Image (cartoon, grey):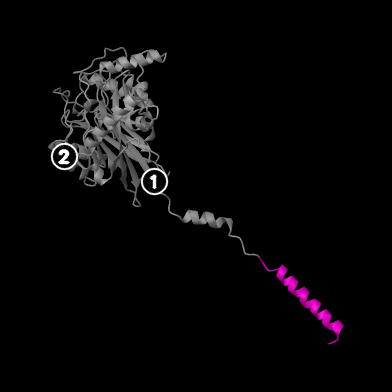
Amino acid sequence: MTRPVFAAVLLLIAASTSACTATTPKRLPVPATTTSTLAAARPAAPRTLTILGAGDELLHPQVWAQAGKDAKADGRPGLYFDDIFASVKPAIEGADVAICHLETPLAPAAGPDTGYPRFSVPPQIAQTIHDIGYDTCSTASNHTLDAGTAGIKRTLDALDAAGVQHAGSYRSARHAARVNMLTVTPHGGGAPVKVAQLSYTFGFNGLKRPAGEPWVANLTDPTAILAAAHQARLAGAQIVVLSIHWGVEYSHAPDADQKALARQLLASPDLDLILGCHEHVVQPIAKVSGKWVVYGMGNQLARHADPIDGNREGIMPEFTFTESVNGQWRVTKAQVIPTWVALSPNIRVIDVPAALADPHTSAADRKVYAGALSRITGYVDGLGGKTVGLTIASGEQP
């Protein structure tokens, strides 16, 4: 091969090599749809919802006197109860379902208002119950009949006007036959969840329901409670909560009857949670048949003639229900928020952990709240609830 021809061949080879290098494809990018497809393939987080209970709303004359002072200070006419609950409002509003216990019947708008032993209290409390975040109230208590059937009707009318559901006392047999059902949108979205609330009491302080009208207020009977829970399930309830007025006043320990009734009721698949009231002091929280029973939530609001530590203490237990793969809802977290009724300079219901976490809380108040927290922790854990998953909010930073 002559030199010119050889050179030409080399130039052709070089050009060919250069061309091949320039056209070699780069690594293909991951399609944008691949990432979203992988995310869609991950299982969705389980849906949850929270249910919060609270102790007795027990209005004594000093309480509505405070509501009058607060209304005047705020430039409002009449009575205004909202300020009393300002500390606990965030916790109540934060729950998906918040359940109160309205222990006393309501009076006419113009009064008269009466305290112990036969209560008939200002109806303005109904609007406050709504405004601070409660969704439904139990109305069956030993004071339900204090103002007769007229008092029952006034109470239910006021709650209805305020947009608060209720269970435990009724205007008619037809009304009593209905399930108190709440429809809740759970965390995680999806179809709404139906939560039913029942309410029963051990008695009426010696008063009798009108002849032929046993439906005006629910008297505790295990068979009736289980039948009502089953009826709620048939109506579509996915969670059924029982509010029950029981136990011995001023006893921090549940009695044998409470324990036996809790065992009997929670053995049923139709009942998921028991919230107990009446004792005016805090009692333990325990697990029975794998479910939670709150034996006594104490008072949320009261001003007894003898205001001892016990009747100024309360709890707001909050239970997180989680949906399982088979669609059942079970409690996966149980927490207690201790509360305290401050009497001076104003009557106020205090969220104890929130107050202890607030750097503006005075040293004197901090000492009072820390003492309440310590006592309440002891009462709540009296049956070993902490060993089976119960937590008690303390206000301490993690």
Q: Quadrant of the N terminus?
A: bottom right
Dot 1 crowding, Cα within 10 Å, few <14, some 14–19, many 20+: some
Main SS class of the magenta portion in the image: helix
Q: Position of residue 305 (x, y in %)?
A: 21, 18
Residue 285 can be seen, yes or no: yes
Q: Residue at x 17, y 38 (%)?
A: 222
Q: Residue at x 36, y 16 (%)?
A: 70
Q: Position of residue 18 (x, y in %)?
A: 75, 71
Q: Residue furthest bottom?
A: 1
Residue at which label 1 appears: 47
Instruction: Indicate the quadrant where residue 182 lies.
Output: top left
Nearer to us in this view, 15 or 367:
367
Is 305 inside the magenta-drawn segment?
no
The span shown in magenta is 1-25
Q: Position of residue 99 (x, y in %)?
A: 31, 32
Nearer to us in this view, 231 or 55:
55
Q: Which amino acid type is marked by label 1?
A: Arg
Labels 2 and 1: the sequence-earlier one: 1
Between the residue at mark 2 and the residue at mark 1, the CA separation in whole angstroms equals 32 Å
Residue at which label 2 appears: 259
